[in-house]
């Protein structure tokens, strides 16, 4: 028997109730039955984004919303600033370069967080910058960037947008898009939203909608002005991902029943327990400045074959962790605490790593990580 545990930072496990709701017979999308569901999820997303704006629901993975942000607001030749601190920062560079933007970067060692001053200096040196593109949580390195502080800097400039990839921060952290001065906020379905991959969510500020009036980059499927018009009428321009939207309704009910403050607190506690547990096992965290509450990365010892370890844990023990990408391939391990993940999932993650690492010949004190986690959880049952 192989019981499966999905402990990677996306896709994440889907609650049983959501799976069942998505398995209901297909309905047609040009019906009031669908429109009523769509209306409910559109409203339900606003408090999670911290916005009064419309949150548009697109069929596509998170990258579709990243691309939509760029092609709907900017123009060829525009100067943009990218915080390039990991695999997903690099993706901003690739998208912007594809459309002929003039990209400048703040290159940061993987695992570190950008300092708001670094963003401010670039904006002072290049006042013509049209947009700052950043991840809130850089999932590839498990580092968090100080978005609220960056928002204070960028929002003072009428001619510059702050575009935030919140794919592993929305639904993990309380996020106040309007108050923090975020102009475009993006997320996807397969991380904190506990759904299969396939939905991209995006909201634009008034300032960003003004930019869309001047953007001439060609777009068809991802035309947000057209999409907004449709979604204001509780329908979509193209065939929506009906089952995933039905699943999203169910997810929002689960999140609201728990209460959003409790959702954020649970993520914070599972993250703290994972970090402290892994440190008690003797590991060093990859995120040096601000570790993210979505996933925890550790540095594996020199010579340890991280790729082989992840494969063995998945194939022989049923646990899916994530390894490293690009130059960190084989060198780090990432443990998720995203979405449908509670205290006891964290205990399983730590316990299985203690056993797995021991079997792989590392000197790990059995129970050391689990004990620390239990100490953290013992006063919070029912959170
Ligand atoms: C997962 C993730 C993405 C990628 O989204 P896809 O759904 O694979 O297109 C982008 N940014 C961050 C920060 C992510 O964690």
Image: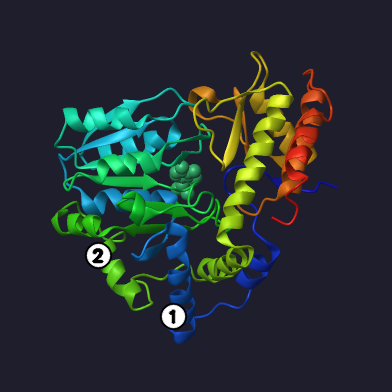
**Location of residue 52 with respect to 102 vertically, above or below:** below
Mark linked to residue 154: none
Which of 169/303 is in front? 169
Which of 297/330 is in front? 297
Q: Residue at x 15, y 39 (%)?
A: 77
Q: Does any atom of ligand 1 lie closer than 8 Å to the CB of label 2?
A: no
Which of 135/227 is in front? 135
Callout 1: SS = helix
**Location of residue 132 with respect to 289 vertically, above or below:** below
Q: Is residue 156 left or right of residue 265?
A: left
The crowd level at tag 2 (other Cα within 10 Å; few <14, some 14-19, many 20+) is few
Q: Residue at x 39, y 30 (%)?
A: 114
Picture quadrant where residue 271 is located:
top right
Callout 2: SS = helix
Q: Position of residue 126 (x, y in %)?
A: 16, 31
Mark linked to residue 35: 1
> In which quadrant of the rendered image does the C terminus lie?
bottom right
**Location of residue 17 with respect to 14 vertically, above or below:** below
Q: Residue furthest front?
A: 379
**Does residue 270 appear in this view?**
yes
Tell me the residue that label 2 is attached to: 225
Q: Residue at x 78, y 40 (%)?
A: 374
Q: Residue furthest bottom?
A: 32
């Amino acid at each position: 028997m192989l019981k499966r545990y999905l402990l990677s930072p996306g896709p994440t496990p889907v609650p049983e109730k959501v799976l069942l709701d998505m398995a209901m017979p297909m309905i047609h999308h040009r019906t009031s039955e669908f429109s009523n569901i769509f209306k409910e999820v559109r409203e339900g997303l606003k408090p999670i984004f911290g916005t009064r704006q419309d949150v548009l629901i697109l069929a596509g993975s998170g990258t579709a919303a990243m691309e939509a942000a760029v092609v709907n607001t900017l123009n060829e030749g525009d100067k943009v600033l990218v915080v390039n601190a990991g695999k997903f920062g690099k993706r901003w560079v690739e998208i912007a370069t594809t459309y002929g933007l003039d990209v400048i970067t703040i290159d940061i060692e993987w695992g570190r967080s950008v300092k708001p001053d670094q963003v401010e200096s670039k904006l002072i040196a290049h006042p013509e910058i049209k947009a700052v593109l950043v991840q809130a949580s850089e999932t590839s390195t498990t580092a968090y960037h100080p978005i609220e502080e960056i928002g204070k800097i960028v929002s003072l400039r009428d001619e510059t947008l702050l575009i935030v990839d919140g794919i592993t921060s929305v639904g993990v952290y309380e996020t106040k898009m309007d108050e923090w001065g975020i102009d475009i906020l993006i997320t996807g379905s397969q991380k904190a939203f506990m759904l299969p991959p396939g939905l991209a969510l995006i909201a634009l500020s008034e300032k960003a909608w003004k930019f869309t009036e001047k953007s001439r980059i060609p777009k068809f499927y991802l035309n947000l002005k057209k999409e907004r018009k449709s979604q204001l009428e509780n329908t979509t321009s193209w065939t929506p991902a009906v089952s995933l939207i039905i699943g999203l309704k169910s997810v929002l009910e689960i999140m609201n029943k728990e209460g959003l403050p409790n959702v954020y607190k649970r993520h914070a506690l599972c993250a703290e327990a994972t970090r402290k547990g892994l440190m008690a096992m003797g590991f060093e965290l990859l995120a040096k400045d601000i570790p993210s509450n979505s996933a925890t990365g550790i540095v594996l010892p020199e010579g340890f074959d991280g790729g082989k370890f992840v494969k063995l844990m998945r194939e022989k023990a049923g646990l899916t962790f994530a390894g490293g990408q690009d130059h960190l391939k084989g060198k780090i391990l990432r443990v998720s605490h995203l979405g449908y993940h509670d205290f006891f999932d964290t205990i399983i993650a730590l316990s299985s790593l203690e056993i797995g690492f021991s079997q792989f010949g590392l000197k790990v004190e059995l129970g050391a990580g689990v004990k620390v986690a239990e100490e953290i959880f013992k006063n919070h049952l029912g959170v």
